[in-house]
């Protein structure tokens, strides 16, 4: 009964009215992920709002305000599975004031599913979100060039959007791009191949998602890292150190360095949740390990294999600011990085990113939804990699000291395209 | 521009990834919050959640108590399962009683046959204040309902216990941050990304113990609101309703007055995995009268502080 499938996490990107929620609705309906009663509820809601037979966007727009205003405010998570893999879909809002929610969805995504209205091309908001997705480390794109029925399935109209997408995606450094001509409303090339596009030899949206590389969390040029979450006391007085592996596979017998202390030791035992004692554990697995040497390791420390991350109290980072009040030099915040929380201070602002031109302009503050390059000092040392090398040890959030709200997403270093 | 090739994680199966993520969340919240509690109803999702919590801190003891929000209208098999499980684990059980809330005049008595599901909110919030809990783990899943699909894994509640779906904290990467001010609290949902099928596959893999009512058995039931309701001290036939003996099982377990059974001959975990994989009706749609009042019934209850 047990089949082995992996997980692909994807985030949706698209401007208002390009048909993003409809595409997700179509994907769920045509892969039979919706139960009869859920489908009936969508039909009923559509009829009550007088929007025709079946408004597929009602599948994902679940909040009262979203249905009333016909927009997506927050990320809706949806689940689909095929014999190939399980999909976790973060359906993200398109409006600029909800950028924080879009970043929430993209931060854990392996891939972005982009919806573009073929008649309008890439809108400002879509470019903005592609930029945020690229900053957040999403490397793959599947682009539904949508509403093809409205342009009579014109290959020329499709190609002009493809050209535009490839130019922008090239600038942002996306690895793998697949563009698909679709009509989410009618179901063409979403799950089932269309009869209207004999000139298109590529996969449907679903086939592109099924064949895409999962696990964009990290790359393997850096060694494994294990941020310590919790110390487990073993019977007989020993201790093991629990956390989730990232970066690369960790093995029993690996020589590791405890950071920030800088103590070299060896992993003498490794336990996974499923197998108990094991010889290795890959990225994304929660484990606990025993060390050869007596140390005072605890929460907030990190075990790493070479090449080692940096230990520093000063970082330069690309920051997406969500706070209501502007971020300026001198702002004091809390910073959470891996399993460590420490006071932090902004000591300099190197500039604000213009997402339309991908240039960095001068500026002395970051306003809500701005992206900027920021110098930070922290009270306690951090153990960091550049974000482009490791999405776990390269990321942090900033927390308002009074309200405890999460007010920024930070990525160590500067994105290659800036 | 060429980037370093990605390293696919195809070597790790989805249940192990879901399990590891849930355990990561349990450990983060336990480390960052002062007084967490785990909500345990005796249902399958909370049984899986408790199983994961035990694994997360083994061989140590569970570093927080478990709490049952007791409507006073339970399936006896589920109460027995609750008590056996708590005793087996040596866990501390806190009971938040709806009956006590009624007796103290905190909520109006809906009468002997009235549904008490919505009253659980008051009992739950009162218990959170009384015990000073700053985080409550729940077994809710995002695939259950459209309002739940929108909720963060760590969901902030204000000093009145309310959820504001328009002002949720951004939740980036796996940097779950659990800071709250006095009087506020968090709900933490480690099973957010699990589906009903994932739950059953995991129960099969791990041999998670469950109350017997999840498995097919013969029971006296009657048809009401297009559901099979068990005849018991709370549900008695009304004029025109007929009691029948049928082979049924429960897909969800809640208050005995509003949780329906489904006709099924699935008597083993393996048979249930097969049944769930081919089901046409969602578990809440099939079995929960409380979600049928309106399109946004769950959102309205969640705003008030429901699970």
Image: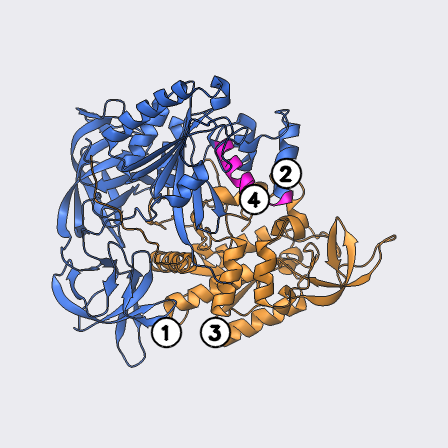
Residue at which label 3 appears: B89
Disc 2 element: helix
Kindly identify which residue carries mark 4: A32
What is the chain letter for disc 3?
A: B
Question: Residue tagged by mark 2?
Answer: A41
| C-alpha distance separating marks 4 and 2 | 15 Å
Range covered by the magenta-colored residues: A21-36
Q: Position of residue A236 (x, y in %)?
A: 29, 81
Q: Residues within 10 Å of mark 3 (few under 14, many from 20)?
A: few
Q: Name the mark nearer the viewer: 4 or 1.
A: 4
Query: Which chain's residue wears label 1?
Result: B
| SS under mark 4 | loop
The chain holding disc 2 is A
Q: Nearer the viewer, residue B172 or B302?
A: B172
Disc 1 marks which residue? Answer: B59
Q: In whole angstroms, how far apart are the C-alphas of marks 3 and 4?
A: 40 Å
């Amino acid at each position: 009964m047990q089949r082995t499938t992996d997980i692909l996490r994807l985030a949706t990107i698209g401007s208002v009215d390009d048909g993003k929620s409809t595409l997700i609705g179509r994907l769920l309906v045509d892969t039979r992920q919706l139960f009869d009663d859920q489908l009936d509820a969508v039909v009923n809601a559509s009829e009550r709002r007088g929007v025709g037979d079946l408004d597929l966007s009602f599948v994902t727009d679940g909040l009262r305000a979203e249905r009333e205003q016909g927009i997506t405010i927050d990320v809706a998570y949806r689940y689909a599975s095929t014999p190939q893999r399980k999909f976790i879909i973060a359906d993200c809002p398109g409006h600029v004031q909800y950028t924080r929610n879009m970043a929430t969805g993209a931060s854990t995504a392996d891939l972005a599913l982009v919806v573009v209205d073929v008649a309008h091309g890439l809108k400002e908001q879509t470019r903005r979100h592609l930029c945020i997705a690229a900053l957040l480390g999403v490397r793959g794109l599947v682009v539904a060039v949508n509403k093809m029925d409205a342009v009579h399935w014109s290959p020329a109209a499709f190609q002009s959007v493809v050209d535009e997408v490839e130019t922008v995606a090239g600038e942002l450094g996306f690895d793998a791009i697949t563009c698909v001509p679709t009509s989410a409303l009618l179901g063409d090339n979403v799950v089932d191949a269309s009869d209207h596009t004999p000139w298109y030899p590529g996969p449907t949206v679903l086939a592109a998602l099924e064949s895409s590389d999962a696990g964009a969390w990290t790359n393997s040029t850096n060694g494994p890292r294990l941020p310590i979450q919790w110390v487990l006391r073993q019977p007989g007085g020993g201790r093991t150190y629990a956390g989730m592996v990232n970066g690369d596979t960790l093995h029993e017998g690996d020589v590791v360095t405890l950071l920030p202390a800088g103590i070299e030791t060896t992993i003498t035992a490794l336990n996974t949740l499923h197998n108990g004692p094991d010889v290795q554990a890959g990225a994304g697995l929660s484990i606990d390990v025993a060390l050869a040497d007596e140390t005072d390791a605890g929460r907030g420390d990190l075990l790493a294999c070479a090449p080692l991350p940096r230990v520093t109290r000063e970082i330069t980072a690309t920051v997406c600011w969500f706070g209501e009040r502007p971020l300026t030099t001198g702002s004091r915040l809390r910073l959470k990085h891996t399993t460590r929380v420490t006071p932090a201070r902004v000591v300099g602002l190197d500039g604000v990113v213009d997402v339309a031109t991908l240039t960095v302009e001068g500026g002395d503050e970051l306003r809500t939804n701005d992206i900027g390059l920021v110098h930070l000092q922290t009270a306690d040392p951090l153990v960091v990699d550049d974000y482009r090398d490791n999405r776990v040890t390269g990321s942090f959030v900033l927390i308002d000291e009074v309200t405890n709200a999460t007010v920024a997403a930070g990525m160590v270093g500067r994105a290659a395209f800036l | 521009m060429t980037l370093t090739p990605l390293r696919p994680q195809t070597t790790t199966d989805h249940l192990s990834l879901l399990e590891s993520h849930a355990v990561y969340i349990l450990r983060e919240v336990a480390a960052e919050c002062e007084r967490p509690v785990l909500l345990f109803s005796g249902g399958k999702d909370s049984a899986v959640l408790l199983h994961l919590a035990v694994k997360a801190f083994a061989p140590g003891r569970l570093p927080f108590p478990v709490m049952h929000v007791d409507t006073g209208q339970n399936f006896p098999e589920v109460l027995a399962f609750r008590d056996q499980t708590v005793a087996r684990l040596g866990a501390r059980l806190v009971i938040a009683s709806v009956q006590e809330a009624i007796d103290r005049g905190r909520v109006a008595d809906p009468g002997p046959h009235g549904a008490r599901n919505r009253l659980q909110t008051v009992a739950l919030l009162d218990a959170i204040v009384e015990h000073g809990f700053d985080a409550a783990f729940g077994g809710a899943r995002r695939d259950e309902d459209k309002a739940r699909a929108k909720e963060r894994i760590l969901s902030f509640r204000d000093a009145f216990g309310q959820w504001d779906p328009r002002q949720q904290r951004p939740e980036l990467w796996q940097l779950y941050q659990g800071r709250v001010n006095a009087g506020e609290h968090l709900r933490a949902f480690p099973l957010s990304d699990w589906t009903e099928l994932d739950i059953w596959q995991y129960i099969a893999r791990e041999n998670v113990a469950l109350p017997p009512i999840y498995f097919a058995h013969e029971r006296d039931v009657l048809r009401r609101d297009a559901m099979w309701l068990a005849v018991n001290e709370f549900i008695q036939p009304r004029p025109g309703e007929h009691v029948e003996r049928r082979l049924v099982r429960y897909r969800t377990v809640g208050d005995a007055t509003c949780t329906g059974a489904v006709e099924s001959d699935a008597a083993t975990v393996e048979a249930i995995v097969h049944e769930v994989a081919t089901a046409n009706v969602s578990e809440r749609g099939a079995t929960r009268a409380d979600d049928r009042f309106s399109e946004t019934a769950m959102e309205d209850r969640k705003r008030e502080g429901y699970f």
